[in-house]
Amino acid sequence: MCDTCGCNVTPGNRHLAYKPVNGGTSAVSVLKKLLAHNDDQAAHNRAHFDTRGILTINLMSSPGSGKTALLEATIDALKDEFRLAVIEGDLETENDAARIRARGVPAYQITTGSACHLDAHMVHEALHHLDLSAVDILFIENVGNLVCPASFDLGQHRNVTLLSVTEGDDKPAKYPVMFRAADVVVLSKTDLLPVLDDFDPARAEQCLRQLASTVPLLPLSARKGQGMAAWYDWLRSELAAQRARVSAGQTVKPCIQPDGARLHAEVG
Amino acid sequence: MHELSVCQALVNQVVEIAQQNSAHTVQVITLHIGPLAGVEPALLVSAFPLAAAGTVAASAQLVIEPQPLRVHCQTCGADSEATPNRLLCGICGDYHTQLISGDELLLANLELIT
């Protein structure tokens, strides 16, 4: 669906495009995405990444579900295989960027003040503080929040949503917008499952599937090194896919049902 | 919480369009918002006056037209109504569905005084 060719005009909104003009009042049909400015900046960021063959991954979850711990383990396992870099988003402190730098990987910390999410402009500003010529995979650790970050495209290629087993297994049902945005869902801290009698991984998966999501669900424990191979394999295959796209002159946005967008267009 | 950011983006777009159409006042702003847009209409309405203050849209009426949540089933081919956390086919119950309406976050229409 785009804002230029008219494919966003559907039977439901077509009448808006032909509203009569009365006297000094005129009606203008717009049908533009509300976040068009952010989306333009995100497309610009994505072009930066694609020019350099970088795969950019956006990590989203509740605060404390283990995003930084997952990155630490990933750096330890893959830093000799790939050149990694991290953009950290928090309201305050350099703590997470310091944890990443301690592992020997460049990191830039965005402190948002009171903003509840990263946007494409903040990420663009951060890119000027990183040497993108020496990066294969860039991770963006979004502000811990299961609501707002899902609405803002940053220019990333894939969204990873973490669900830790210390949260409720019905989180996907409570926060459908966030879990629909995921290209992969990581079930984190699974080493704690034996002491948590109220979290059922099968129920978490059922809640995810009820959102019509067919994405992989990867149970793992970054701290205990359990289930990590599937996560590393997912990253390797995504980087290979990104390199294939770049050499074919293509790019990709995180997939919220691309076929759904095509259906919107066909209706118009 | 992010509704104020969305409102600021909205006001920027509206002001731009008003200038393009040489309008001095924006009377009505119509938005299309689906249940899965990730934006709460009531919060948008309360944040709007803050974002619009001092612009040509300051006195505009914000009209939000909610959009239905509908899915298309890849398995049985039917279109059906759904709810935000249950996007299964309403006919056969399969989860291989595609959203055909319900995630819109669109500026649909403006009424301008020129």
Image (tube, coloured by chain):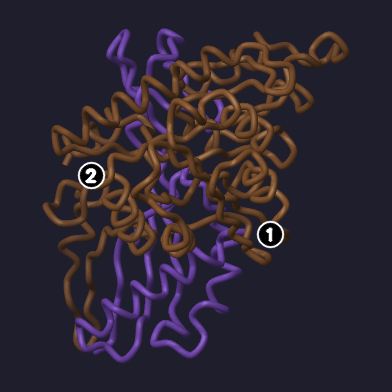
Question: Quarter holding the N terminus of chain A?
Answer: top left
Chain holding disc 1: A
The amino acid pointed to by label 1 is: Leu
Give the colour of chain A.
brown
Q: From the top left corner, tell me how far across and down residue A186 is, in percent.
A: 59, 23
Left-right relation of A200 to B4: right
Identify the residue shown where x is 30% and y is 52%. Answer: A48
| Image quadrant where residue B80 sits | top left
| Image quadrant where residue B74 sits | top left
Few, some or many C-alpha atoms within 10 Å of disc 2 (few <14, some 14-19, many ≥20)? some
Left-right relation of B46 to B11: right
Question: Quarter holding the C terminus of chain A?
Answer: top left
Query: Which chain corresponds to the colour purple?
Result: B
Few, some or many C-alpha atoms within 10 Å of disc 1 (few <14, some 14-19, many ≥20)? some
| Residue at mark 1 to residue at mark 2: CA–CA distance | 34 Å
Query: Where does label 2 land, which residue?
Result: A1
Q: Is residue A77 above or below residue A156?
A: above
Identify the residue shown where x is 45% and y is 65%. Answer: A125
Closest to the camera, between mark 1 and mark 2, is: 1
Query: Where does label 1 land, which residue?
Result: A91
User: Which mark sits nearer the N-terminus, 1 or 2?
Assistant: 2
Please, what secondary structure does the residue beneath circle 1 have?
A: loop
Q: Are marks 1 and 2 on the same chain?
A: yes
Identify the residue shown where x is 35% and y is 54%. Answer: A42
Identify the residue shown where x is 53% and y is 52%. Answer: B39
Residue situated in front as seen by the camera: A98 or A112: A98
Which residue occupies the extreme left position in the image? A5
